[in-house]
Each structure stands twice: as C-alpha cells, then as structure tokens.
Image (cartoon, coloured by chain):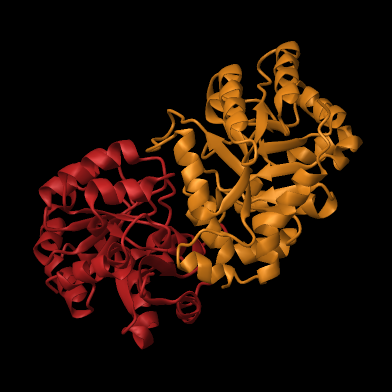
Chain colours: A red, B orange
Amino acid sequence: MVDKFFDATCSIGTYASQELEFHTVQELVSNMDCFGIESAVVHHNMAVYHDAALGNYKLLKEVKPFRERLFPSWVYEPELSWGGNLNKFINEMQLNGIKAVRIYPTAHKFQITRWNVGDVFDAFDDARLLVYADPWDIDFSMLQSACETYCNIKFILTNPSYYFQRMLYPLLNMYPNLYVELSTYLVFGGIDELIGKFGADRILFGTGMPFHDPGGAIAATAYANASDEQKNQIAYGNLGRLLNDVKF
Amino acid sequence: MTIEERVRRGLPFDNPRIIDAHIHLGGTTLVYTPDISLEYLIKSMDRFGIEKCVISHLAALSQDITYGNREVFEAVSKYPDRLNGLAVVNPNYSKTRNLEELDNWFVESAVGIKIHPELHGYPLDGADYNFVWETAIERQSMILIHSWAGEYYRTGLVSKCGPERLWTVLERYPELQKIPIVIGHSGGIHEGYVTAAALARKYPHIYCETCGWEFSFTWFHRFVEMAGEDKIVFGSDSGLHNPAYTLGRVALSKISETAKQKILRFNMEKVLSNLKVLR
C-alpha cells in the first residue's frame, strides 16, 4: 500500500475552452486533502495560455500560503521581455525557489536548440532543474537532442498518453535523465513494462488536476505490479529525490 | 471494505465483481501494447476483479472483420463465462457480406454488434448503417458504438461518430428505443458527454460508457450528475488501456457506494440479463 502521494503535475487558473472542476489554489489544496495527496508541483494556466511572466508571478502570489505543500513550477518561453537579461531571470528563479519548469515548444513556437535557448538551458543544466514537456507539444527528435545535450536536466514527459511508446522506449533506454509522469499513461500493461524495463525510479506519480480527476493515477499506482517500496518510489520518493538534487 | 479502500490497496473486486462493457482482444499498429494475448487479458481481468466483459477484436475494427470476429468468438468459446462477444461490421462492405458475417456470429454466441464509424470513415447516421439497427431490432441484441464528438483538430471536419448523430437514427427507427445501446467513450470530449448524457436521460435503454475519459476534462461525479447513476456502465478499453485508470476514476469519485456498485456491475448486468438474442 502506498504511504503518501506527491503529485508531479497539477495546475491552478482557468481554461478558456471549458469550465474546469476548480481553478483556485484553495480548491486545489482541498482536493489534495480529499484524495490523500500530501504535496504537489503546481503551475499556473495563465502562464501556459496567456502570458508566461504574468502567470508565473501570479502563481507565486497564490501559492504563498501553502508553500510547505506546493512547489511552484514556472512556464519558460524565450521571453524577450526579460530584455535578454539571463542572470536576472535565473536569479528570480533561484530567489523564488523554482526547481521545475514547463516548456511548450510547439505552442509557444521555439526550439530547444543552442541558437534559440542555449544560454538558458545551460543555466537549467547547471542548476539540475526539472523540465516538463508534453509529447503532444514536443517533437521527439528535439527531446532526444535536449536529453543528450543537457544531461543534468531531468526531463519529465508529462501527460504521456498511450500513443508514443515506440519513440519513448528508445529514449528511456538511452537517457537516464528522462522520466515519465503517470497522469495519462494509459497503456495496457504499460506501467508494469516500464518498471520491468527501466525501473520504478524513472516513473513519477502525477494527476493533471484540475483537468483530470486524480483517482485514475492513484489506482494506476496502487495496481502496479510492483513491491510496496517501488510503489512508494513512484508515489512520492522519486519526485522528492529529483527536487532535492536541484542546485537552487 | 469500501470500494475506494479496495482500489487504494490495489485489490481485485470480489463483492460485487465488475462487469466491463468495453474490452478488446488483439492489437493495432496504431499504438504499442506490451502483451495482446488472450491469456494476459484474462490475467488482467482477474487482477482487477472483472468477472465478465463485452469484447470485440481490434483487427475487426482496423482491418479484417472476418479474421477479427473469428478470433474473438474462439476466445469466447474458451471462456464462455467471462467473455460476451460482439460481432464487428464494416459499412464499407456490402450489406450482404455484413449480414452473412452477423448470421455466422449470432448463431455462434454474439450478444450484439460493435461499430466504429471513425475507423471505418463512415457517419454513424449514414444509410449504410441501417442494416445494423434493423438487425439489432430483429435479433434483440445490444449495440456498442465508438463515439467521439467535435471537429477534427484544425480541419473543420465534423466527427463521423459524434453521439448527436444518434438522435436522427432513433427518430428513423423508433423500435430502436427498446434495444440496449452503449455509447462507447460517452462521446469522448466534454461536448460529447453532454449529448451522450442527454440521450441516456431521454431513452431508457441507452447507456453511457466510461473509458477514454482523458480528453473530457470532466470529473466523474459531474458526469454522474449529468447522465444519472443508473445510465452509466463501466468500460475499461482493456487491450488498449490500463483498466486501473477508469476504475480509479469511478472508485474514488464523490458519489455514493451504491452508485459505484451500479456503474461497476449492476447496470451492465441488467443490460446483459435482459438480452434475448435471437439466434
């Protein structure tokens, strides 16, 4: 049986296409309590869909009363409004304890290449940050190149779906800095095979709240063909270890 | 032990055991699945406490109806107490060929018909599906429909399998109102959920099914409010999907224990026990 859960991915903020189950930080915490989730890495939907900088700072303000349980994750885009001041950006992250970043290269129209974001990713690499990418939004060749180039960054494939195993498995095999988050890893027999082939330490429990109700990921962890020790690694141990390793 | 406690411990259901309205045998080139054997499927059903299911073959949906249907009914003959077979038809083939296919499998053991308007590229309310409705009425069988609402992404093309197309079909065939129809995936996205729930509320023999929820962004207790606890049946999409996800979504939702039991077993048990399939 799993002792506790540390949610690798959830968000606050509204969503234009649909009224979600909740959107405030208080509602997030209340649902975490309801489902027995102790802590979570959280980002703001405003940073994904409207304005990264505005959403990132709004996130900080909103999670402030819950910082013992909520770990803020910023959305990164090659933000020209930083005026190219990389040091200021990285200092702000460090000052605010940002250990995880989400990227949307397709939606936000950039590439993880040296000429486009090399200086920032070098800084992420130095800090050993967690960088989340969604397979619906990132080209797998770009992900491969990023895993290879920035081997201290922990890349986390979030919202992984059941479509991408033929590209995911070779990458997991080649790059120990790639991890899979479970919110939508629906593959029939997939979690058991991931554990068998790559180890439980490459898998992170995540819910995707408020888009998804958390029961699915909780049950997927509980029914994994794994020891209690492995289930606890997935449920909270791996994420805690990765965050502790960040140099901020 | 409550249903939630059982799921949190990763235990198989035993009281009641689950009836699954949507399971597949076989694989598909569209996605990778580690083990597509019948033995693994049965083992998976045991692990979750799925006593019985309604099953169709992915090959019949994606390529060869005769091959896929034969495979599924051979499996049914091996596990007659666990598997209820659906015969898949394809509207791109002649009515004669489809009716021959249905004759074969209804004589064997089919409990109904499965259609997949998306994979077959033919609209749910098109005339070439009329034989499906007529056969189901004639044989008093059930129908499982793959449904998904909305427009195809950035194409402006309207889905061929949106549940809204069922309104037309039900007007065309009033007797179909007495036939159990399971709306697979309940229309997939939220817009589809709304329509599927409205259909289930209006027609006593129409049921919404639970798998493929990940695009709906609708929490399960909300869907129960929309469709009603008597009109939703559990479906896992096993063979493609890990049943734990849909099971957990139902088991940990903010609905009553009785509602969970109905959805996980009793609603589908009612559908199957009321079938009087004419061979």
Residue B52: x %, y % from top left:
63, 45
On screen, residue A29 versus residue B221, left or right, reads: left
Give the residue displayed 20% in from the left and 66% down from the top. Answer: A242
Depicted B19 relative to depicted A68: above or below? above
Quadrant in which residue A55 is drawn: bottom left
Front-most of residues B196 and A248: B196
Q: Residue furthest right?
A: B174
Q: Is residue A31 visible?
A: yes
On screen, residue A135 versus residue B240, left or right, reads: left
Residue A177: x %, y % from top left:
17, 54
On screen, residue A127 versus residue A9, left or right, reads: left
Quarter of the image with the N terminus of chain B is bottom right
Give the residue displayed 67% in from the left and 58% down from the top. Answer: B263
Front-most of residues A196 and B130: A196
Front-most of residues A7 and A76: A7
On screen, residue B71 versus residue B165, left or right, reads: left
Q: Is residue A19 visible?
A: no
Depicted A224 relative to depicted A135: above or below? below
Quadrant in which residue A228 is drawn: bottom left
Residue B113: x %, y % from top left:
71, 31
Depicted A108 relative to depicted B94: above or below? below
